Amino acid sequence: MTVLLAGIAVLVSGVGSAHAQNSWVFNNEIPCATAPVYGVQFSKCWTSNIRTFRIGTVQSWRLTYTDMKSEVAIGLYRLVEAHGVGGLSPVPSSNAVDWLRTADPLKNLTAGAGGWAYTASRAGDHYVTFSRAQRQCIGFIRNGSGRSGQLNWILGAAFCRESATPIPLSEVEFIADAIKVRE
């Protein structure tokens, strides 16, 4: 019986570590000034574990800002090391809603949200609206640098605030224009 219980404990602990290798884990808090994303104020920033894919190794960052009436989350996926001619695939406008809804660095704002709708694409950024509790939200995706179909990074952002009406696209474009990625 003791051997059986010890075997189950080893099996369960192995499942936990295997799961961590197959998911993004944001448990390494960093000074926001060291993050590769800049241009807006952040209050907390994290890096993820580095994961290996067919295209190479990829790391992600989660950057957040929260005040009494609004929340911002920015997520960056960056190719750390390409394998062969690999690269991240660009997110087309047709996949913008699903990409934002499932992006791990943004889940603190997108989990439990509803009313998802693609809004527009401007200057290469894809915009999506959604709502969460008493907050109106808008998010965007920016396909980063690299050759066609082989990007070095992809950035996603979500902005939510208490509001009875949807957030105007022009307001979020102002934020999107301010956000930069260090190459």
Image (cartoon, helix red, strand yellow):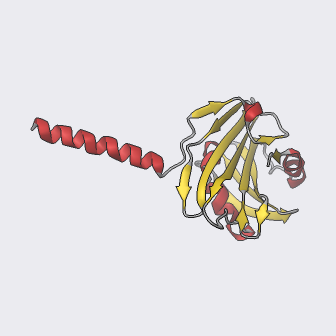
Give the tally of numbered discs: 0
Nearer the observer, 160 or 179: 179
Residue 25, x across and y down, in percent: 53, 42
Which quarter of the figure is the N terminus placed in?
top left
Nearer the observer, 45 or 162: 45
Residue 31, x across and y down, in percent: 71, 29
Question: Residue 147 is drawn in which quadrant?
Answer: bottom right
Outermost residue on the left side: it is 1
Q: Is 73 left, or right, of 175 in this rendering? A: left
Whether residue 150 is situated above or below residue 107 in the rendered picture: below
Residue positioned 55% across, 64% down in the render: 54
Residue 32, x across and y down, in percent: 73, 32
Q: Is 106 left, or right, of 7 in this rendering? A: right
Q: Is 134 left, or right, of 11 in this rendering? A: right
Question: Residue 148 is drawn in which quadrant?
Answer: bottom right
Residue positioned 72% across, 68% down in the render: 92
Any part of residue 81 in sight: yes
Residue positioned 74% across, 64% down in the render: 118
Any part of residue 66 in sight: no
Residue 61, x across and y down, in percent: 66, 43
